[in-house]
Image (spheres, helix red, strand yellow):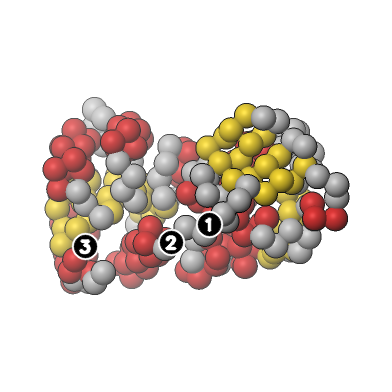
Amino acid sequence: MSAEDRLILVVDDEPRMAKFVRMNLELEGYRVSAAINGLEALDKVREDLPDLVLLDVMMPEMDGFETLEHIREVSTVPVIMLTVKGEEEDRIRGLELGADDYVTKPFSPRELASRIKAVLRRAEMPAPVEKTAIVIDKDLEVDFQRREVIVRGERVKLRPTEYRLLYHLVNNAGWVMTHEMLLAKVWGHEYREESHLLRLYITYLRKKIEPDPSDPKYILTERGVGYRFVDFKEKPG
């Protein structure tokens, strides 16, 4: 789909910022709608069905995090959080609540456009699928068709980014995948320097599949290089 076929919802209570973002998105060819608070944003997500939401964290009454939680109750629309530079806790919290990415203020129009294109591209990509569940060992199976892992008999749901990351690790089991390689495959080439994103999602995955996340047996760290999924094909199932 071309930019003019895309509707982006900008949620920001600061008129100057909203106007700046709208102007630059329209120059890129996007259609833009705006909301000045979380309640208005929720109404527009339901009614306008935007292709992407730019959501400011710092808003009165219902902040960006609470708004995101409510959005995720009704929609899987891609969301990019707008955070204050240096507030790492805000970025992590947003990702944990289901944001697809974040951009720190102040940002350039070029950076924002690049992030939007990358997130829209990921949302369009067909998810990699294996037709059958893969048995890693007696404690772990991966069902790529259902986007689930079965950990000691219990089904655990994966978020889309966790799913893509695990897919590439498992399908290259026994091989070291560099930070840059994983970032490019899972997030896109624009993210090859964003190693903190990779570390964060490796942590999420380990919490879901490892018996002891602090001493992982499946997703192994190759210090200074990348990560390697255990070569389960050489082990009895």
Judged by depth in the image, the label closer to the viewer, 3 or 2, is 2
Type of amino acid under label 1: Val
Type of amino acid under label 2: Pro
Q: Residues within 10 Å of mark 3 (few under 14, many from 20)?
A: some
Quarter of the image holding residue 116? bottom left
Q: Is residue 63 visible?
A: no
The residue depicted at 22 percent of the width and 56 percent of the height is 8
Q: What residue would you read off at disc 3?
A: 6
The residue depicted at 41 percent of the width and 50 percent of the height is 100
Q: Which mark is residue 193?
A: none
Q: Label 3: state its secondary structure.
A: loop
How many dots with numbers?
Answer: 3
Lower position in the chain sequence, tag 1 or tag 3: 3
Q: Label 2: state its secondary structure.
A: loop
Q: What residue would you read off at disc 2?
A: 126
Q: Residue furthest front?
A: 132
- Check contact, mark 1 vs mark 2: CB within 8 A: yes
Q: Residue furthest right?
A: 235
Q: Is residue 168 above or below residue 145?
A: below
Q: CA distance from mark 1 to mark 2?
A: 9 Å
Q: Which mark is residue 129?
A: 1
Type of amino acid under label 3: Arg
